[in-house]
Image (cartoon, grey):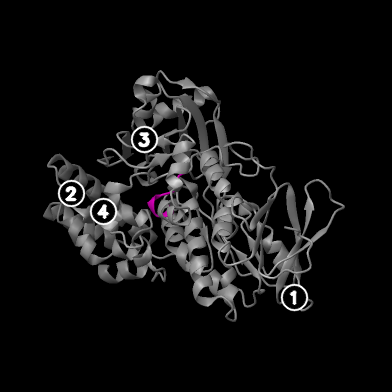
């Protein structure tokens, strides 16, 4: 592909070749003749963390819905990661703990892996597409626009480090998937556009990750999650996950500027201080392979481009360049996949219509809104975390109490039923909401509240109801209804014919 050709018919320019950029290229390869991806990094030669993705050393995993999307885009993709050495979960141990107990998940299906292995597998599939080219070690320096600046018609690029060069690349569509370092706000301002108010959550997130060799006698341990829970005083969480090459990736995490230690001794002490000592016990005789590596994310940011009065045709933004979430909840890559799936649907149904790009941006916002709302509500439990945005959140204190009740009763009931060899899918509703299969409104409502309350004594029920109403003058049904936004996202199409109520038995790789 000659990027300097004057004929730009049906050409797309994608900025960034991370997970979002690669999935975007896969979808657009069916709609456009030429796909050119501009990537700042050098071409990877093996599965490994990339310099341009500073968080890539840390834990990554698609939650079940993201896995389903990738499988549809790349049939037999599971065989790719298996051949690369991803850890197979069949007959392996998965343990997930919260302050109210352990979830009885048993053995799982599928695979766990590093971010490097996952991205490598996707990259190989995309690079094999005949109409896709990745231009490595180049960067976009400016957007090209029509004289009236109403349409983006390409970009100016240059090889990294060669500041004197300026190469013109024409395209019908430019898509920014460059992540948190996105320059789209500056480029739009340079073109004379007025930006909408962004939304921020001052999370103060901190990670510390260290790799260990898996002892031969413990190769059945695949995944152990200890959830932090700020309202109960547990400010730090920990995760152990088996990845390729007989390796455990182990992560300490926290928010609200409570940063985990990044020295070896402090890391081991941090494991021992978790409210459940299981990680320290498992790692007692494990050989460290790396020193702990830290990562900090002071704020999470959501751009509201869909609220701008004017938006140029020929430009789209998705992935972390549109919105980057609190990574503690493990939803980032899955949400990028959802955005790409949303783009594919829009292309099939509305391509060529007036204001197409603005329509796509609105649909993407609809898709990410429930996850952003959910993670923001949880982040606001942490000391020092604030939310700044065009719309204030409602019922935050009420929702914290409500979700605590959901988690407590769900954990207790799932354990009780498991001991009897039984299962009731309604007690997975809280988790299915977190895994993006059902709407928060399917969990926060009077019917579900009554289901949870049937498992407490009459006296405790009255105390819980009084506590939920504290500080409010309205009836509880109205409070619950007004606390959760009327999300426009179509959750019914999430599983493409699968029954979400059975997903917990088939997909247990859910956090990270």
| Secondary structure at numbered mark 4 | helix
Which mark lies nearer to you, 1 or 4?
A: 4
User: 10 Å neighbourhood of mark 1: few (<14), some, or many (≥20)?
Assistant: some
Nearer the observer, 89 or 376: 89
Determine which residue is flagged by label 2.
423
Is 503 a magenta residue? no
User: 10 Å neighbourhood of mark 2: few (<14), some, or many (≥20)?
Assistant: some
Which mark lies nearer to you, 4 or 2?
A: 4
Q: Label 3 to label 1, Cα distance in Å? A: 52 Å
Residue 133 in the figure: left or right of residue 277: right
Determine the residue positioned at 26% across, 56% down.
Answer: 501
* Residue range of the region highlighted in magenta in the rendering: 61-66
| Secondary structure at numbered mark 1 | loop
Determine which residue is flagged by label 4.
502
Q: Position of residue 69 (x, y in %)?
A: 44, 56
Determine which residue is flagged by label 3.
224
Q: Label 1 to label 2, Cα distance in Å? A: 59 Å
Q: Label 1 to label 4, Cα distance in Å? A: 50 Å
User: 10 Å neighbourhood of mark 4: few (<14), some, or many (≥20)?
Assistant: few
Q: Label 3 to label 4, Cα distance in Å? A: 22 Å
- Could you tell me how many numbered marks the image carries? 4
Please say if the residues under marks 3 and 2 sit with CB atoms less than 8 Å apart.
no
Chain-order first, disc 3 or disc 1 = 1
| Secondary structure at numbered mark 2 | loop
């Amino acid at each position: 592909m000659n990027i300097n050709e004057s004929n730009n018919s049906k050409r797309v320019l994608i900025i960034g070749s991370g997970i979002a950029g690669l999935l975007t290229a896969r979808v657009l390869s069916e709609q456009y003749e030429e796909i050119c991806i501009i990537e700042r990094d050098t071409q990877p030669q093996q599965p490994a963390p990339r310099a341009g993705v500073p968080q890539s050393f840390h834990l990554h995993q698609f939650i079940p819905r993201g896995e389903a999307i990738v499988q549809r885009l790349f049939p037999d993709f599971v065989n790719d990661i298996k051949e690369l050495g991803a850890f197979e979960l069949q007959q392996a141990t998965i343990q997930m703990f919260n302050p109210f107990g352990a979830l009885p998940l048993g053995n799982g299906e599928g695979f766990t892996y590093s971010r490097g292995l996952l991205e490598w597998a996707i990259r190989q599939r995309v690079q094999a597409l005949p109409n896709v080219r990745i231009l490595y070690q180049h960067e976009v320096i400016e957007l090209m626009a029509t004289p009236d600046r109403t349409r983006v018609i390409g970009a100016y690029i240059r090889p990294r480090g060669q500041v004197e060069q300026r190469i013109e690349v024409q395209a019908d569509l430019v898509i920014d998937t460059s992540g948190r370092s996105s320059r789209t706000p500056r480029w739009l301002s340079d073109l004379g556009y007025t930006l909408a108010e962004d939304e921020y959550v001052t999370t103060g997130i901190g990670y510390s990750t260290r790799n260990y060799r898996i002892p031969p006698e413990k190769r059945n341990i695949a995944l152990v999650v200890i959830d932090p829970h700020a309202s109960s005083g547990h400010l730090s969480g920990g995760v152990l996950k088996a990845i390729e090459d007989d390796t455990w990736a182990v992560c300490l995490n926290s928010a609200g500027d409570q940063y985990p230690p990044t020295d070896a001794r402090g890391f081991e002490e941090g494991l021992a201080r978790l409210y459940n000592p299981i990680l320290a016990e498992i790692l007692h005789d494990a050989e460290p392979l790396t020193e702990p590596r830290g990562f900090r994310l002071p704020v999470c940011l959501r751009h509201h481009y869909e609220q701008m009065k004017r938006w140029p045709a020929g430009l789209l933004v998705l992935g972390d360049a549109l919105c980057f979430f609190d990574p503690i909840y493990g939803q980032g890559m899955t949400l990028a996949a959802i955005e790409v799936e949303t783009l594919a649907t829009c292309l099939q149904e509305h391509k060529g219509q007036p204001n197409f790009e603005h329509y796509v941006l609105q649909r993407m916002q609809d898709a990410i809104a429930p996850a952003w709302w959910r993670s923001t509500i949880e982040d606001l439990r942490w000391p020092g975390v604030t939310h700044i945005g065009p719309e204030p959140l409602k019922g935050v204190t009420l929702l914290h109490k409500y979700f605590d009740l959901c988690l407590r009763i769900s954990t207790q009931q799932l354990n009780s039923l498991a001991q009897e060899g039984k299962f009731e899918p309604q007690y997975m509703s809280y988790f299915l909401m977190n895994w993006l299969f059902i709407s928060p409104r399917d969990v926060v409502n009077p019917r579900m509240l009554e289901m949870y309350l049937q498992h407490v004594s009459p006296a405790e029920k009255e105390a819980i109801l009084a506590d939920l109403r504290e500080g409010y003058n309205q009836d509880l049904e109205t409070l619950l209804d007004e606390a959760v936004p009327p999300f426009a996202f179509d959750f019914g199409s999430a599983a493409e014919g699968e029954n979400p109520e059975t997903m917990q038995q088939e997909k247990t790789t859910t956090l990270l």
